[in-house]
Amino acid sequence: MKIVAIEVFATELPLVRPFIVAYDAFHKLPSIIVKMTTDTGLVGYGEGMPDPHVTGETFSSTYEMLVKDIAPLVLGANPFDIEKVHRIMGQAVYYAPSAKAAIDIACYDLMGKAAGQPVYNLLGGKAHDFLTVPYVVSILPPEEMARQAAQALQDGYSSIKIKVGGDPAVDVKRIRAVREAIGPDVQLRVDANQGWRNVATTMRVLKQVEDCQLDWIEQPVLADDLIGLAEVRQKTFIPVMVDEGLHGDKEMREVIVRQAADLINIKLMKCGGLYPALKLVAQAEMAGMGCQVGSMVESAVATAAGAHLSLAKGMIFSNEMVGPLMFSRDFGQLRYEQDRLLLADRPGLGVEVDEAVVRELSVFAAEVS
């Protein structure tokens, strides 16, 4: 089986409501969809969701890189030769993880379809019976965040994740308001997205919310400050999760050596797809660190890929595959029942991609063959 054609679609997905985090506010999100066709007639889909604040990739740079620099090089490759595909991409372009993730995910979709198996069976089979996702609350006034969190519980969610990272004094009010609204027993995750920047600010906030029973605090300091993150971990009993500070093997080694975090947040768009993500899971297992699979708020395509990884690995205790719940339009459908994400047992990613919607939402498109 050989890859004979690749189409790249640069699209924009509309959100149901603005998504507000410490470093930006989003009203729509850029998604690069890759359609990969083989000489056997099989078609696989992948997705790259670039975030310039996290990976240094932009919407236009990711599209251009795929069309001109990466996709032409993997034509003729067998999608099952995934290590070779990554070697080819790595020799051509340093880093660019979301562009590489789009190719990687499409290859896994093809592998599953060729084998007649869902992707999770290619990754080790089901380690979990089902997946649950949290309800994610954007940065808003404390009372509105509390209202949304309480409503989410009524809608069937069992865990809440809130975004903070603005004014530290207001963040304390946000955390306390949400905890009061949801009660003492509901899981509460807090993500600062680098917004507190340094150890001093982080500890000032955490000292004031020590009684709020947080599941963990995620990326409170700047991404490249693993020394600072390690200091936060030493000074608080709240578990610390690294997100933007962890991309691939290089950062993973440093996190382990510095004992900088209790937990890691793996994102396919940060590490370059499923194949590199498997290596991060293995390293985390060696170091005894729990794993979460996070999301750049991707469409059903990349969300399904992350969900297959989450289902297949026992070290992954948490996932945030919530993208499809946040878009008013999507390229396919995933099945959610309250806070449960139920993957189809169909071959590949199990997502029926509506190419008409892909083309309708495209800003640019090109075919490489």
Image (spheres, rainbow, N blue to C red):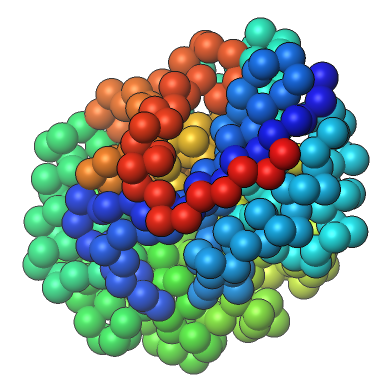
Where residue 251 appears, as percent x and y from the top left, is 75, 66
Left/right of residue 305 with respect to residue 117 in the rendered view:
left
Left/right of residue 204 with respect to residue 219 in the rendered view:
left
Where residue 72 appears, as percent x and y from the top left, is 77, 48
Left/right of residue 85 with respect to residue 182 in the rendered view:
right
Quarter of the figure with the N terminus: top right
Work out whether 227 lies above or below 34.
Answer: below
Where residue 84 appears, as percent x and y from the top left, is 90, 40
Q: Nearer the viewer, residue 167 or 288?
A: 167
Where residue 281 appears, as percent x and y from the top left, is 72, 43
Residue drawn at point x = 65 percent, y = 48 percent: 101
Q: Quadrant of residue 154?
A: top left
From this viewpoint, is residue 233 visible?
no
From this viewpoint, is residue 345 visible?
yes
Residue drawn at point x = 53 percent, y = 61 percent: 50
Work out whether 341 lies above or below 268.
Answer: above
